[in-house]
Image (cartoon, rainbow, N blue to C red):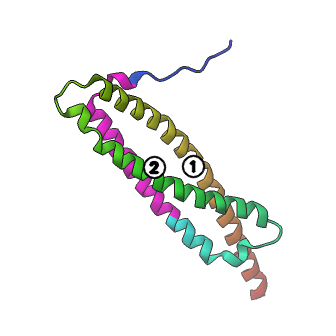
Amino acid sequence: MITTKTQVKYIEWLSPNEMHQASKKWYSELCFIRDEQLFFDDLIKTYTLQLLDKNKFESNKETIEALDNSQKRTDELLEIIRTHSNDLEVMVDGINQPKEEARYKREHKGLVLVLSEFFIDYKNLKNALFQIIKDVLKAEKQRHLINKK
């Protein structure tokens, strides 16, 4: 059986309040992600010498560059969500503006897709960063045990 990709059309039935709540949730999640990214930056600065290990340097470098790109994308998305939330006035002002309301709903639908993809990509990046830090800590512990003997 072959399945086809379907487009999400539920946005047309969302109330302005539901879209506002979704925007607030996205903004909150992006702020949390930004804090996590700062935490990862601190870890990277702490273990810079270990991350420069010639055996894993290239893969570590790619992951760290991906973190930098993710930070820039997070800042962009925060600004987009802030603007999107401010534009909600079109939906709740009581004036019938079908074109502007349709544009806002299209924008919201686009943000649903963009943010879903971003959250998945960030989760994968986070797993890679945790693996790198775990490997560094494991190597540090082994070196410490060897030097202790």
Question: Between 101 and 66, which is closer to the camera in this rendering?
Answer: 101
28 shown above or below 133: above
Query: Residue 66 shows which numbered tag?
Result: none
Q: Is residue 89 left or right of residue 41?
A: left
Label 2 crowd (10 A; few <14 / some 14-19 / many >=20): some
- Identify the residue under disc 1: 123
Q: Element at badge 2? A: helix
Q: Is residue 79 left or right of residue 63?
A: left
- Identify the residue under disc 2: 77
Span shown in magenta:
11-37
**Of helix, strand and loop, which mostly describes the magenta segment?**
helix
Q: Element at badge 1? A: helix
69 shown above or below 1: below
Q: Is residue 14 visible?
A: no
19 shown above or below 50: above
Rendered image quadrant of residue 141: bottom right
The residue located at (43%, 31%) in the rendering is 109
Rendered image quadrant of residue 147: bottom right
Residue 12: x %, y % from top left: 35, 22
Rendered image quadrant of residue 43: bottom right
Circle nearer the N terminus (2, 1): 2
Q: Quick one: which residue is furthest to the bottom in this view?
A: 148
The residue located at (71%, 71%) in the rendering is 51
Residue 47: x %, y % from top left: 65, 75
Q: Quadrant of the C terminus?
A: bottom right
The residue located at (75%, 73%) in the rendering is 52
Question: Between 69 and 28, which is closer to the camera in this rendering?
Answer: 69
